[in-house]
Amino acid sequence: MNNSELLRRNQSNPSPAVIDSPRTPPCSSCKTRSPIRYMLREQRLLFVFVGIAIATLFFNVVRFTFPPELRDDHHRALNSFVRLGSTIPMRRVLYETRREGSLGRVNLAGRVPPGLKNKNLRIVVTGGAGFVGSHLVDRLIERGDSVIVVDNFFTGRKDNLVHHFGNPRFELIRHDVVQPILLEVDQIYHLACPASPVHYKFNPVKTIKTNVVGTLNMLGLAKRVGARFLLTSTSEVYGDPLQHPQAETYWGNVNPIGVRSCYDEGKRTAETLTMDYHRGLGIEVRIARIFNTYGPRMCIDDGRVVSNFVAQALRKEPLTVYGDGKQTRSFQYVSDLVEGLMKLMEGEHVGPFNLGNPGEFTMLELAQVVQETIDPNARIEFRPNTEDDPHKRKPDISKAKDLLGWEPTVSLRKGLPLMVSDFRQRIFGDSKDDISAAAALVTTTTTV
Ligand SMILES: NC(=O)c1ccc[n+]([C@@H]2O[C@H](COP(=O)([O-])OP(=O)(O)OC[C@H]3O[C@@H](n4cnc5c(N)ncnc54)[C@H](O)[C@@H]3O)[C@@H](O)[C@H]2O)c1
């Protein structure tokens, strides 16, 4: 037999050593027995039982260490998260499932991830150092929320917020909204914008930038962190109205190239942006159209008619009436506005909503109320009217009444003394006790 023949014979008749090799499939009875044998070998089963016992003990200890409400929160949060099975940012989901409570309180119970004890809202108020913003901050802090004020102090003052310094739930950031900012918040009240003609005409390009770029930046923030956004627009979007009183359905009569356009058109664009972010990107938004508001902390010489008259009467100067004094305005006390803004933010409706006091006064009637309140001998001086000054302004607030259950409660004759005390104190440095005394006057409320 030659070598090649030997080789071929070896291939067709494999040796017994090859048959017994471990790679050969085992018999069927061996197949069923081998896992059991594996488990029983070297006390592996015992280790498995010990492992199960330790895990059971651990989960029970953790469960009873957490307070009951947190345990439930944890389970519910986990369940909802698993059910959603999505990559939606957690905070956004939390916000959409909240409920309204008394006074618009928000209830996040059951939705706070374990380990985070603070269930109150984190709210940013742009322009919070200003007149309206600082009163809003007072109410939000009083309600128990954490507030971050973003303000560039163009017309705002630290004095308006000094009573919150040192409160751990309050933060103040000097920042211009024309630049982007990233903050982790649940709600954004966007007020930043000079509001009086003297201030918004001072640098019109900056005013329109604040309204357009500033609003874009804050809407961008709302989108990024899933916050609800509220824009404080203005009755100026109605321009010199051809419809009286003005309902939200009226589109306005605005001069696009006038000296007031930086403000009027700026706010109209801000409303457009707000609605486009809502429709296009699903951002939760609210729009308030604010009518003339007055109260303590207004800038003293800002050219707004109520602050002008009050400061002039206190300084024994003549009250300056522009035009024939027959143009009308409505005057809302600031606490009514703040109540309306909060109801709007916490409610389910986007708006726009008119927030104002429907009581209508001519400038001469207002001068008369100021005379009665401060100085009956105050003189009235007539001056030529300013460009684009609207002739009539009076809100139709039916929509806010029906859908928000809101209407103003402080009459001009009740609210004016409060403002006078604050102005007197700031102009002459009178004691703050006078202001508290005047505040006590507004115990009963009536509509103008
Ligand atoms: N008070 C009213 O009668 C009235 C009426 C209609 C609308 N509004 C609106 O309400 C809001 C608040 O008005 P207000 O009366 O309190 O005015 P305000 O001037 O007292 O307050 C505006 C605040 O915004 C800040 N600000 C301005 N530009 C800014 C910027 N670029 N970046 C950051 N902060 C900036 C100011 O420093 C100020 O603190 C405004 O948006 C205004 O248009 C007010």
Image (tube, rainbow, N blue to C red):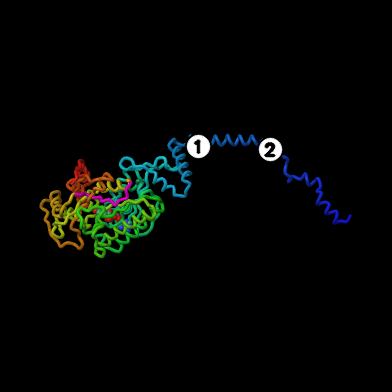
Residue shown at 47% from the left, 50% from the top? 87
Q: Is residue 21 left or right of residue 310?
A: right
Q: Give the amino acid at mark 1.
A: Val
The amino acid type, in three-letter code, at marker 2 is: Thr
In the rendered image, residue 255, in percent from the top left (x then y), is placed at: 24, 63
Q: Position of residue 290 (x, y in %)?
A: 26, 52
Q: Quadrant of the N terminus?
A: bottom right
Crowd around label 1: few <14 · some 14–19 · many ≥20 (10 Å): few
The residue sitting at 12% across, 56% down in the picture is 380
Q: Position of residue 149 (x, y in %)?
A: 34, 51
**Mark found first going from the N terminus, 2 or 1:** 2
Quadrant where ligand 1 appears: bottom left
Residue 54 picture quarter: top right
* Residue 142 shows in this picture: yes
Magenta span of residues: 348-358
Mark 1 Cβ and ligand 1 under 8 Å apart: no
Marks 2 and 1, how far apart at CA: 40 Å
Q: CB under 8 Å between callouts 2 and 1?
A: no
Q: Crowding at label 2, few (<14), some or many (≥20) Cα neighbours within 10 Å?
A: few
Please state the total of marks drawn on the protein image. 2
Q: Residue furthest bottom?
A: 257
Kindly identify which numbered label has been placed on residue 243: none
Is residue 378 found inside the magenta-colored segment of the image?
A: no
* Secondary-structure class at tag 2: helix
Magenta stretch, main secondary structure, is loop
Look at mark 2 in the image and give the residue it sits on.
Answer: 32
Work out whether residue 41 can be spotted. no
Is residue 238 left or right of 5 when viewed as pictured? left
Residue 80 image offset from top left, x and y in percent: 45, 43
In reply to whether residue 354 is colored magenta, the answer given is: yes
Pointer 1 residue: 62
